[in-house]
Structure formats: structure tokens, C-alpha cells
Amino acid sequence: MALHIPFDNTYALLGPGFFSKQLPDPVVAPRLIAFNQRLADVLQLGAGEPAEMEQIFAGNQIPAGADPLAQAYAGHQFGNFNPQLGDGRAILLGEVTGTDGVRYDIQLKGSGRTPYSRQGDGRAWLGPVLREFVVSEAMHALGVPTTRALAAVATGETVWREGGMPGAVLTRVAASHLRVGTFQYFAARGETEALKRLTTYAIERHYPQAQGALGLLRAVRDAQARLIASWMSVGFIHGVMNTDNCSISGETIDYGPCAFMDQYRADQVYSSIDRMGRYAYANQPKIVVWNLAQLATALIQQLDDPQEAVEEATAIIHAMPSLIEVEWLRLFRRKLGLETVAPEDLDLISDLLQLMSDGQADFTNTFRALSEGNAVEQFRDAKAFEVWNARWMQRRAQEQNAEALMRASNPVYIPRNHKMEEMIAAAVAGDFTLFERLRVVLATPFDVQPGAEDLRRAPEAHEVVGATFCGT
């Protein structure tokens, strides 16, 4: 039976200035590695044979209704503005509307050169494709807004990075690929009419209740505030929170040198290219405020009197830190089994995190151990923990469903960095067993699963991953 994708494309209607029409580059010997059937069902994709799917999701065959294009955008990368970035190794095949009523992009990532590739080859190697597949689906299962992975295909070709690596293509699904950098692209060029069309499109697609450019700014601010707090609550570090990686829809996008913390450290950095700690764990709330300020700067340029809008836009951005803190507090309260609000909660949470930092406690395992009643084992200074624990028990006594709330808020399993590296190394050697196992276990991360003890274990000293890499 032929695979049917019910495309209904709207981004292409914005006009050629927003993209370049581009077909994917065919690959030599596509082989389907993974297909996300549950997501396919949401997208209302008809059934297809593996041979056909690997041709489509490798970019060798363009399905009916697709309108392949590479999107244009700009972006601040580590604080430095680049006026033209764009999809240098990705092709948007088109859009579909899911069973949930949401419009989704279907994009091939690693599908070859585009007009925005600069000196790149437009390809992806197997490691980053599998990493994004596993991590994005794990984030979805954790309840964090995220792009999704529909398929992964090996290309049968060699991609050259530090050496020769097996090539692959990821099919990514997103509520859209509109970024802060998309708005910066037109603002930097002074293309006011295009900026207005983009603003109208973003409002209609994502925030139909928003009123005008500043209404869009407020809606994106609120979505990003919730997103960053959710990252913090699971110990996630994005690693490259450039404005071109900051989604208008409020989804996590572009899993490059991302990582989940092992030992808790507020200044934890994994990304090999983040040498100054700009995107460290604790800096993420500050950076997203900075990113949204860049969005505000771009958006107000379409208004009749931009200077008049500066004061309102500034107030919208200045309110963001408190919005992040409110959501952060709500999520961390839940991790401690607290639904009610008390004045001492911020100190209670902050003191726990300081104890974890001082004792080099594992972030995920400590919070889960609090749920299971054996957290003292996570701390080097048991007496200091017992003092804190007494305070927590007194506070928790006010709650009715603390244990159930904690078990639903503190995962047993995350994509451990050392396991991800082990998975990639095995896959490069042709063994996808760990990849498949991680997919299964991380689909239900809050449930203890027999035989998966190794996947919740913190790394031994020799297993610690000190740096992660983008893979481009």
C-alpha cells in the first residue's frame, strides 16, 4: 500500500522571499532505521511499505502534495548577529494537520545542500540523527514541549567530519519551524511588509487570540517561559540557545550539543562550543529573556511608530523573569510533592539544590529517590540532608497526594549522556539494540521498568561525558 501524507501547505504561500524552493539530494542506498508509528497516526499518515518509506524519508522520492523548500532566517549565535543563516541542511516537505487539530511541519534534516549551506555539505551523520530521535521523543514523554522524530534513515553514504561517518537523514515534525531568527531576517533587511506578513502568519498559526505584533510577543514570551522552566525541572541543557534555535511555538528545537545533567551544578556546561558558559544550565532563563528582547526589537519595526511601542515591548520583556520563576517554582514544588503554596518554598527548594551541588548529587536520581524514600543515599553529608529533610517533612505534611505527585513529576529514566554515547558507538558499528531499547524505556520515563536498572544508573567516573558536540 502506498504511503499517503495529507499535505496542506501554507508557509509556501508567504512568497519566495521567505524560502528557496529546493529538492532534497538523493542518496545512494537508503535503509529505514526507525519509524515512529504513534506519531504517524497523529499525523494521519497512511500505511506504507518499508521500501517506499525509506525512499521518501531519505529524500529520494517526493510524495504527492509535498512542496519542498528551505526556509530563510537570521540569528544571533553566541551573541553575534548573522543576517543570513537559513536551512543549510534541511528541507521542509510540507505541512499536515493532525488528529489533534494542530498543523505540523514535516522536515527532512540532513537532506543535502541548499542555498543557505555556505561551506557545509548539507548532510548529517548517524550520531546526531539518533541523538535527536531519542532525546526529542524522550522530552515528549517527559511532558516537555518539543519537536518530534518521525523517521530515521541511513543513507549508505559517508559523511566527513573529523573522519568518515555513516550518513543519515532525520524526519523532524514541528508545530512550525518559525524562529526568533525568522523575524530578525526581515527586520535586518528593513522588509517591513514581509515582516507584517510573517507576523500575521505566526499569529494565525500559533496564537489566534493574540492582537498584533506586541500580542504575538506576549504570547511567545509566555510559551518560552513555560518551556525554559520545564527544561530546568528535568535538568536539561540545550547548549546552543541562539535566536535561530528559539522557536516561536514554544517548542524545544535543534538538539545539537544538548545534554541532561548528571551531578547537579548550576553552572554545568556540556556543549564543546560554549566555552564561556553562555548557555550553562542556570543561565538559560536569562538567555531566553535576551532572545525575546531580540524578537521585540524585530517585531516593533513593522509598527507605524516603533518608538512609541518601545515602552510596552520593554514592559513585556521585563515581566518575563518573574513568569519563569513562577513556573519554575510550580514545577519544583511538584517535584517535592507540594501543590499548595507557602512562603518558605523557594528557600526549601534552593537549599536542597545547594546541598545537591555541595555533595555532587545526581539531579535525576536524587529527586526520584525523594519520591521513593531513600534520598539520603544520594548525599555525602547525611546529617545536612536530614536537617533539610525534617523541614521538608513538616512542609509536606500539609499535602494530600504528595507521593503520587512526586512519582509523576520525577522521572526514573532520562537519556543519560554516557548511554547516548554508547548507543551511538554501537550503531556506527551496526548494532541498534541499545537505540531500540532506549526508545522503549524512555517512552514511559516515570515508570520503574524491570531489567532497565542500568539505564537509571549515574555514570561511573570513567563514563562521565565532559563535552557534547553539535554534529554539523
Image (tube, rainbow, N blue to C red):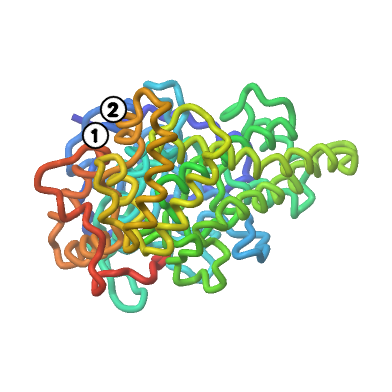
Left or right of 428? Residue 470 is right
Asked if the residues shown at circle 1 and circle 2 are in contact, with their CB atoms under 8 angstroms apart, the answer is yes
Q: Residue at x 40, y 33 (%)?
A: 396
Q: Which residue is mark 1?
A: 37
Determine which quarter of the picture holds residue 462.
bottom left
Q: Amino acid at mark 1?
A: Gln
Q: Is residue 364 visible?
A: yes
Q: Is residue 462 above or below residue 261?
A: below
Residue 178 vertical position relative to residue 78 in the rendered view, above or below: above
Indicate the secondary structure of the residue bearing disc 2.
Answer: helix
**Residue at figure coordinates x 9%, y 47% from the top left:** 451
Name the residue at the left extreme.
451
The image quadrant of residue 265 is: bottom left
Task: In the rendered structure, find residue 41 and report the number of the disc placed on it.
Answer: 2
Give coordinates of residue 74: x percent, y percent.
Answer: 63, 56
Q: What residue appears at the point 24 percent right and 34 percent down from the top-left corner?
A: 37
Q: SS at mark 1?
A: helix
Query: Looking at the image, can residue 58 be seen?
Result: no
Tell me which corner region of the image, top left, top right, bottom left or bottom right, holds residue 147: top left
Q: Quadrant of the N terminus?
A: top left
